């Protein structure tokens, strides 16, 4: 009955007028940026971080969470209607969804995506509520050595499941860890790598990196590409309600997608993106003889991945909330947001701030409900937004990012640093170095160093402590296995294939 | 020696250089011992690790054949220079000229980065965004952002 009790606390917190408003605001914003291609949740959350200084922790996190899962809903709209995924996690939705739209069945595709996402969101919320407490218990048994090993596993897992070159991704993590070393050493008080610049001795703000690399870097990359011709199916959206046949075909896919997405979301590096790819592959394997073939507008190819990405978005909160370890870049920003609000992320959040913890979980269910209403009956408004040209959009992003960086500390040093990271972000883009692992490494860097040094101190300088303590050894072995498995030639080619399937 | 993947070659080189510079710079700080690691301990190890990883990437770039040589392709100089310059301009101008002057400048300058620039559109955009930012950030969120140029404030 603990669960019910906890959920009661949660709904008590989530259903206050203020928190409902912020959940709503987050969902609207999330849908908005989901619909607009070229603006992702990472950049948006980074832009909004300065504005949460004036908020309490609970509404602030509720709003940021709403942006993340709201973006999953909005992203599918763009994918279906203009064949441009609004979010990376809706890349696969575009395959069959767009074909459905071309056949005049945009309404059915949108409904399948929306209702599937809602179902998955509800299940994901329940899973978080059920699994968070036992995981938290486990986390309390962790010492410094275990925490260090867990972070190693988390970081390795994050890149194993990412696309692209593995060695480069690991190098990006290490680069992130190094950037996190530009600060004042906690134990000795020595400023490091600051070149006598006082602003640098406090460390680089993660907002600066996130905005520079994800916000501005992407703008530059987008502008560097020739403008594409977009065909928008705005007039064709009618007959929103799917037929009986659609329902029959879609619901098993929704169930499979939800299950798969929930599992993959918890894994390090998981979350929405991986879940949708995996689900599409699964659907193609399971549904042998679809009425409409895959790639030509099969409703299963929309319902499955869309459910999976929303389930994954929800359950990726589990490692962040219970262990304080972010499995992807968005969660890394959430960890940063908690720190801004003076909450140390980790297992103690659940006992120390039960209202925040359970309120956030309850708000996710409320938010999902709002999103269905926002996205299905009000689809027309979002479609109008699609017709806003990029030349109006990107100066707006520039303005918000600039104001955001300035208000971080009310000085212009952060603005100059952001300009530098915009340049760095474009270099990464040109060299196909993925920036997400860098952000994860940057956020975890100081925590990792502290735990490493503490573990070494406790073991009197014996590096063996990481492998002789069973829990820590298990985590490290898991990390090593992950790397080895991915390096195996057969899996390697599969992995590359999986990420190229578009 | 032929570069088989341009992207990997340059990123590998970048990792090696950055890694070695961090490792070299951390020798300025006390290294400590594994019993009591000093401030230089962790960054030194990480810098070396990054350099090694960069070496592996470099090696791969020189030895494994890729389709089309993995070219970096043309660099979008125009958006790159204009966007970076407009951020820097914002940093210089905001504390001196205030939001009311800086934001329109920022919007118009950054609009030049796109392919299709129209005066009418970007002026309109500048007005909307400046007014919108005032409503959201100063009036709504009550953030401390200079609104008017400093030379106007001296008198009043």
Image (cartoon, helix red, strand yellow):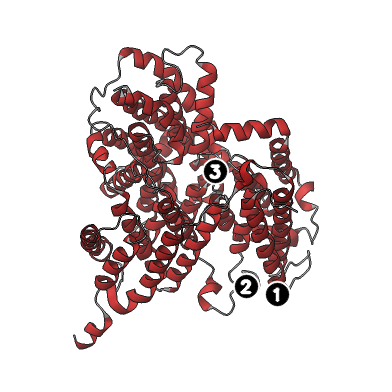
Discs 2, 3: same chain: yes
Q: Position of residue A63 (x, y in %)?
A: 35, 49
A279 vs A334, nearest the viewer: A279
Identify the mark nearer the N-term, 2 or 3: 2
The residue tagged 2 is A192
Q: CA distance from mark 1 to mark 2?
A: 8 Å
Q: Residues within 10 Å of mark 2 (few under 14, many from 20)?
A: many
Please report contact status of discs 3 and 1: CB closer than 8 Å, yes or no.
Answer: no
The residue tagged 3 is A319
In the rendered image, is residue A2 in sight?
no
Q: Position of residue A162 (x, y in %)?
A: 58, 41
Q: Position of residue A465 (x, y in %)?
A: 78, 52
Image mark 3: chain: A
Image mark 1: chain: B
Label 3's element?
helix
The residue tagged 1 is B29
């Amino acid at each position: 009955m603990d669960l019910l009790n906890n959920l009661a606390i949660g709904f008590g917190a989530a259903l206050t007028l203020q928190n409902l408003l912020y959940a709503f605001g987050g969902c609207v914003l999330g849908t908005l940026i989901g619909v607009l291609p070229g603006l992702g949740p990472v950049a948006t959350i980074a832009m909004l971080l300065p504005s949460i200084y004036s908020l309490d922790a609970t509404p602030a996190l509720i709003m940021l969470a709403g942006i993340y899962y709201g973006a999953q809903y909005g992203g599918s709209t763009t994918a279906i209607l203009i064949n441009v995924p609004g979010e990376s996690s809706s890349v696969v939705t575009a395959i069959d969804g767009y074909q459905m739209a071309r056949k005049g069945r945009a309404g059915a595709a949108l409904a399948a995506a929306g209702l599937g996402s809602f179902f998955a969101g509800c299940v994901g919320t329940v899973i978080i509520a059920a699994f968070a407490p036992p995981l938290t218990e486990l986390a309390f048994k962790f010492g410094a050595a275990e925490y260090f090993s867990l972070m190693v596993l988390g970081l390795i897992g994050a890149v194993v499941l990412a696309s692209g070159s593995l060695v480069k991704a690991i190098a990006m993590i290490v680069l992130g860890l190094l950037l996190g070393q530009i600060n004042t050493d906690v134990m000795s008080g020595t400023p490091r790598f600051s070149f006598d610049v006082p602003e640098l001795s406090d460390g680089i703000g993660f907002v600066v990196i996130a905005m520079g690399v994800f916000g501005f870097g992407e703008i530059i990359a987008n502008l560097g590409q020739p403008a594409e011709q977009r065909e928008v199916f705005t007039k064709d959206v009618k007959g929103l309600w799917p037929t009986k046949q659609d329902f029959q075909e879609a619901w098993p896919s929704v169930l499979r997608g939800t299950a798969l997405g929930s599992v993959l979301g918890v894994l390090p590096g998981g979350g929405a993106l991986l879940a949708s790819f995996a689900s599409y592959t699964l659907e193609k394997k399971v549904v042998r003889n679809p009425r409409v073939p895959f790639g030509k507008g099969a409703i299963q190819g929309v319902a499955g991945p869309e459910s999976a990405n929303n389930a994954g978005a929800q359950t990726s909160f589990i490692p962040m909330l219970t262990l304080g370890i972010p499995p992807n870049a968005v969660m890394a920003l959430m960890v940063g947001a908690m720190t801004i609000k003076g909450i140390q992320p980790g297992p103690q959040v659940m006992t120390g701030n039960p209202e925040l913890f359970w309120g956030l979980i309850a708000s996710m269910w409320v938010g999902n409900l709002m999103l269905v209403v926002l996205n299905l009956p009000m689809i027309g408004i979002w479609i109008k937004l699609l017709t806003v040209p990029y030349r109006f959009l990107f100066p707006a992003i520039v303005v918000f990012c600039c104001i955001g960086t300035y208000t971080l500390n009310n000085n212009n040093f952060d603005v100059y640093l952001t300009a530098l990271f915009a340049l760095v972000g474009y270099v990464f883009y040109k060299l196909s170095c993925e920036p997400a692992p860098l952000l994860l490494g940057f956020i975890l860097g100081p925590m990792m160093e502290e735990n490493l040094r503490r573990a070494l101190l406790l073991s009197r300088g014996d590096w063996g402590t990481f492998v002789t303590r069973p829990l820590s050894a298990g985590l490290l072995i898991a990390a090593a296995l992950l790397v080895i498995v991915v390096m195996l030639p057969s899996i390697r080619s599969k992995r590359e294939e999986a990420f190229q399937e578009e | 020696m032929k570069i088989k993947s341009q992207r990997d070659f340059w990123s590998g080189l970048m990792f090696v250089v950055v890694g070695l510079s961090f490792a070299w710079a951390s020798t300025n700080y006390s290294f400590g011992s594994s019993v009591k690691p000093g401030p230089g301990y962790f960054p030194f190890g990480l810098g070396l690790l990054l350099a090694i990883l960069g070496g592996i990437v470099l090696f791969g770039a020189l030895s494994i054949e890729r389709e089309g040589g993995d070219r970096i392709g043309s660099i979008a100089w125009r958006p790159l220079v204009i966007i970076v310059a407009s951020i820097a301009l914002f940093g210089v101008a905001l504390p001196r000229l205030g939001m009311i002057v800086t934001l329109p400048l920022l919007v118009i300058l950054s609009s030049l980065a796109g392919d299709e620039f129209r005066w009418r559109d970007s002026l309109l955009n500048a007005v909307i965004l400046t007014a919108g930012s005032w409503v959201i950030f100063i009036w709504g969120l009550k953030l401390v952002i200079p609104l008017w140029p400093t030379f106007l404030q001296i008198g009043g």
